[in-house]
Amino acid sequence: MFKLGFGQDIGIDLGTATVIAYVKGKGIVLREPSVVAVDNTTGEVLAVGQEARRMLGRTPGNIVATRPLRDGVISDYTVTEKMLKYFINKVCGKFIFAPRIMICIPSQVTEVEKKAVIDAASQAGARKVYLIEEPIAAAIGAGIDISKPCGNMVVDIGGGTTDIAVISLGGSVVSSSLKVAGDKFDEAIVKYIKKKHNIIIGERTAEDLKINIGCVYPKIQDTEMQIRGRDLGTGLPNTVIIKSSEMLEALIEPAMMIVEAVHGVLERTPPELAADISDKGIYMTGGGALLDGLDKLLQEKTGINVMIAQDTVSCVALGTGKALDNLDALDGKPVRR
């Protein structure tokens, strides 16, 4: 089916863990894991997204299921380009006019990393590429009016990076980006289970633990979950019961790194804007914001009210989509191919 006209504007949240696409006038049309399965011998892409995620840790020697983005930036350019092309074709179908695409990036990326995103999107079929910083997109998606001269603090916790920014008059006044987010929480769980129970588990099991019983603030009632992994002593599969109190022990260190980064941004915030944040509170967005107790921990350590945005996982994609309507206000500079 052919799409006519120049109205095909797409906003993409190119996340380390998930790619979410927003099409102008339709809303969110795609939400897939950013995983690609490639045949090493031919270089052919075998599967993308949900199908490829199921292959993680389960492929034969000639097939590699990888995540082409690490810590919020492109680590494998060729695979990222193929993944973007696949997602753009899935969203647009066959188009006569190439789409305009806005992609969000972490707030502290280098010029080289920005160029890699622009080039990958252009090669994947974009007519024009715009970039927007993740915290600004998250703030727009959370329904915050960022055009006013008052301070809003956004903490966007994704898969690869946590972006913290104080926003006023449509731009970041103070921002910070650290490579501690969902993936680091998963790594912390893998290390903890290995050290405490002498069992090796995969990142998918670690993610299941994080989602189901993970917490960074003491729970009133301890919950538990059964997992399977490889016993380091015998080399055979083994089953253990993990409690949420153990997850607290495993996850508190990376969680405190995020809290300290928020503290650091608050210290650099101009006094007038700091007063606004104290009144309005801190907005948390991104999938990592759903980690049990993270909002309570941040509130306790900063003394500022913390709110989790509605539809927190889609905030950045929604904001990127809304920003397409108003590129001038965001001072978005189109980059031509």
Image: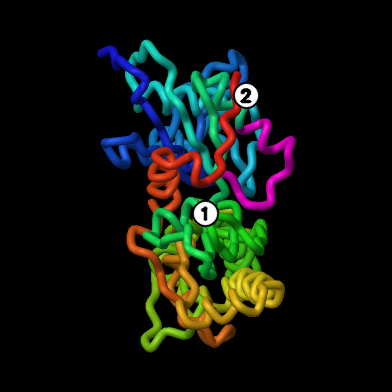
Task: Residue under label 2, please give it.
Answer: 78
Task: Residue under label 1, please give it.
Answer: 136
Q: Amino acid at mark 1?
A: Ile
Q: Earlier in the sequence, mark 2 or mark 1?
A: 2
How many marks can you see?
2
Let me know if residue 54 appears in the view.
no
| Relative horizontal placement of residue 90, taking residue 44 as reference (left or right) | left
**Quadrant including the N terminus:** top left
Name which residue lies at 42% across and 49% down.
319
The percent coordinates of residue 23 (x first, y second) are 34, 34
Above or below for 8 versus 141:
above
Q: Could you say which is closer to the camera, residue 235 or residue 336? A: 336
The percent coordinates of residue 101 (x first, y second) are 47, 30
The percent coordinates of residue 161 (x first, y second) are 60, 55
Let me know if residue 274 appears in the view.
yes
Q: Is residue 261 magenta?
A: no
The percent coordinates of residue 193 (x first, y second) are 58, 66
Specify the label residue 158 is tagged with: none
